[in-house]
Structure formats: C-alpha cells, structure tokens
Image (spheres, helix red, strand yellow):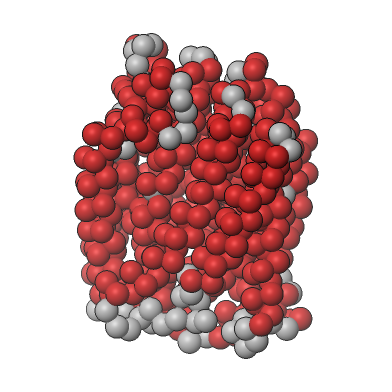
Amino acid sequence: MESNLTKGSIFGNIIRFSVPYMLSYFMQMLYGLADLYIVGRYDGTASITAVSIGSQIMHFVTVMLVGVAMGTTVTIGRAVGEGNSKRVSRTIGNTIIIFIVGSVALTGIMLALTDSVVRVMSTPAEAVSETRSYLLICFGGIPFITAYNIISSIYRGLGDSSSPMYFVAVACVANIGLDFLFIGAMDMGAAGAALGTTLAQTVSVVVALLSVKCKKGSISLDRSDLRPDRDIIGNILRVGFPVALQDGFIQVAFLIVTIIANRRGLLDAAAVGIVEKIIGLVFIIPSSMLSSVSAIVSQNLGAGKEKRATDSLRYAVFICVGFGLVVSVAVQFCAGGIVGIFEDDSRVVELGSQYLRSYIWDCLLAGIHFCFSGYFCACQHSGISFLHNSLSIVLARVPLAYLLSRMYDDTLFPMGAAAPIGSLLSVIICVIAYIILRRRAKHITP
C-alpha cells in the first residue's frame, strides 16, 4: 500500500497519484450531480434548489474535515520520506483521536443550527421545508464523512491514492441506486437524496474498514499509538487547521454568493446552484493537483530532496494551466447544453449559461494557486494558503459578486466574473510568497 514518491519520474509520480484522486473526486461529485439530476427529473425547481443549497452546506462541512485531514497526509508523508515507521503509526493513532472528538462535536452543533442555517442562506420560501429535511439527514451522517476522510488521508500520506478511489466507487454506485429508490420509486424528494447520500457514505466506510483489516501490516497500530502526543497533534493541526479555515472561508464565500443569487429569485438560485455543481466537476484536476503536490512534496522534503519537490510543483502548474485553458475556451461554445442537462426551464438555462461562461475561467487561475497551496502545506507554511485565499475573498470574490449582481440585475455573466478575478489576486500573492521562500532557503543553505 505504501508508495515511495521520492524516486522515478516526477511527471509519472504526479500522474500515478493524481489519476486515482481525480477519479475519486469525480465520483464524489457524482453524488451531488446524481442527486440534482434525479431530483430534477422527478420533482420541481423547489426540490432542485433545496438539494443545491443543502449540498453546498454539506460541502462546506466536508472541506473543513478534508482541510484538517491534510495535516495528517503531510505529517505521514514526511515520516514516510524519513523512513520513520513509528512516527507514521503514532500519527495515525492521534488522527483517530482528533477526528472522533471533532465529529461528535460537529454533529451536535450542526443539528442544533439547522433552522438557523436555512434562514441564513435566504432559502426561497418554496424550498425551505425540503432544505431543512435534507440538512437534518445529512448532518446526522457527519461521523461517516469523518471516518472516510480519516482513512483517505492516511492512505494518501502513505502515497496510496488508489484505495480511497475504490471506497468512493462503491459509495457512488450505492448512492445512484438509492437515489432512484428514494426519489423515484418512493417520491421522497430532497429528503430521499439526503438519505441516499448518507447511506452510501456508510457503505463506503464499512468497505474502507474491511480493506484496512485485510491489509495487515500496511497500517499497524497498538494501544500506545492511541495515546495523545502533543508534538504529533501539534504538527497535524499546524498544517491542517489553517487549511480547514482557508477551505471553510472559501465555502463561506460560495455560500454568500448563493445567498446573493437566492435573493434575486428562485430561477437565479436554481441557475447558480446548477453551475456550482458543474464548476465542482471541472475542478477535479486542479483539486487533484493540490492533493498530489502536498503528498509528493511532503515525501521529498522528508527525504531531503528539495529539487524534486520544486520540480513537482512546476509540473503540476503546467498541467493545470493546459487543462484550464482548454476547458475554459470549450465552455464558451457549449455552456447552454451543459446547463440544460440539469434543467428544462429555458430561463434557468439562459441564466446558468451566462454565469458559467464567465465563472469557468476560474478553473484556469484557481488551478495555479491550488498547486501553490499544496506546496505551501507540504512546507508547513499553510498559513500562506489561508492568507491568499482570505484576501482574495475579502477584496474581490464577495464584494465584486455583490456589486455586479446589483449593477446587472438581468444577467449573471458579470457576477460570475468575480471568481476568476479573485483567483488572479491569489496567484499574484502565491508567486510573491514562493519567490520569498526560495530566496530565504538559499540564504539558509550553506
């Protein structure tokens, strides 16, 4: 299961690590897309809006967990690069402690805040009831989301991105089947989508635990590894907590944009909700590069191979730029057809096409700063990632989305441009930070 990412072709390592992650991320996105598609075929616009709002909230919760888990991936990656198997085991044990405590607390908090969340989101009146039902069911499934992310972060830190892909594949198949059962056959609407997703995640966790049990020796733990270790917990949180705050802040920005769209009316809300799902899908490659860079650079820095670490960053950036350019240009010609897959209403398709054509350029620019974020995390400078994302949100994404929405009330195209403008600011900050870090490293090196 453990994979050495400090040897062989750099490009080959990136591809071998990132492709399974891409497939995992794609299948995770299929959760939301399948929910949206099936609800759209069996129910109305109110149900679509409920699922899009509810799934955004759940994505917010998930990325916070993934952010903390990044600390585990980086800490294990460094230990693997150093050849320190005991530290790997202690990191796994302390990760379990952190996430058990966190998941219990998070579940209780989110269940208590369900009604408040629905109000804060300015949920259209027609969708309030279904949104509430969706969230209550999904919040109850937070422990299973947490368990999946614990196991996945451990595997990825060990250089294995394939096993998490198989776990998600099982959940994806189960989710689609359960959606047709609960939404189609049983006519449960948004609640059926939530129940299908939660049960599918439960199945995924069971399969993951069985996999760990079968691979004896790959992940070894004894009771002493489950004792809290201040140094290891500190390392995990020093990397993971800023990433969690950063990702949470980004999702808050997305939620604010959703609120802005919701206040424009049901059709605008549906259009923005659909496009957010589509954007999530095309962000598979940029997101996979972030995870790949963090894992690969961590192992190489642990092994003292700084040249391979920086080369890995460059390769990942080139991949993201090439992909982002092709996709952004292609979408200009087929935006309407893409949005039309999820909604038949011509006005929703028109608004969604406008929003998608400007928003899609974020795929190109965000891909660049995603790669830098992965590098900064591996260098244990995740605070830089938090900084550039925070400034991007505060200075560009949110204020521009609000202003452009007010200035152009008959189109969503200008509002969609706020995202790539924000990413451009992030790219500039990342490049400056990278140059400063490299210069400092040269001064320190004798």
Figure check: 249 above or below 150: above
Along the viewing direction, whichever of 312 and 15 lies nearer the viewer: 15
Q: Position of residue 196 (x, y in %)?
A: 68, 47
**Left or right relative to 123: residue 396:** left
| Residue 7 image-quadrant placement | bottom left
Can residue 253 be seen here?
no
Q: Residue at the spot x=50%, y=49% of the render?
A: 29
Horizontal side of residue 250 vs 210, given as left or right = left
Identify the image quadrant of residue 137: top right
Q: State left or right for residue 128 relative to residue 5.
A: right
Give the residue drawn at x 69%, y 75%: 210
Residue 321 x/y as whole percent: 23, 52
Instruction: Tell me where residue 203 appears, x and y as whole percent.
Output: 69, 61
Q: On the rendered image, what quadrant is the C terminus found in?
A: bottom left
| Rendered residue at 60%/62% (across/down) | 170
Q: Nearer the viewer, residue 30 or 273?
A: 30
Front residue of 417 and 224: 417
Residue 330: tell me if it is visible.
yes
Give x and y (percent) for residue 311. Answer: 25, 69
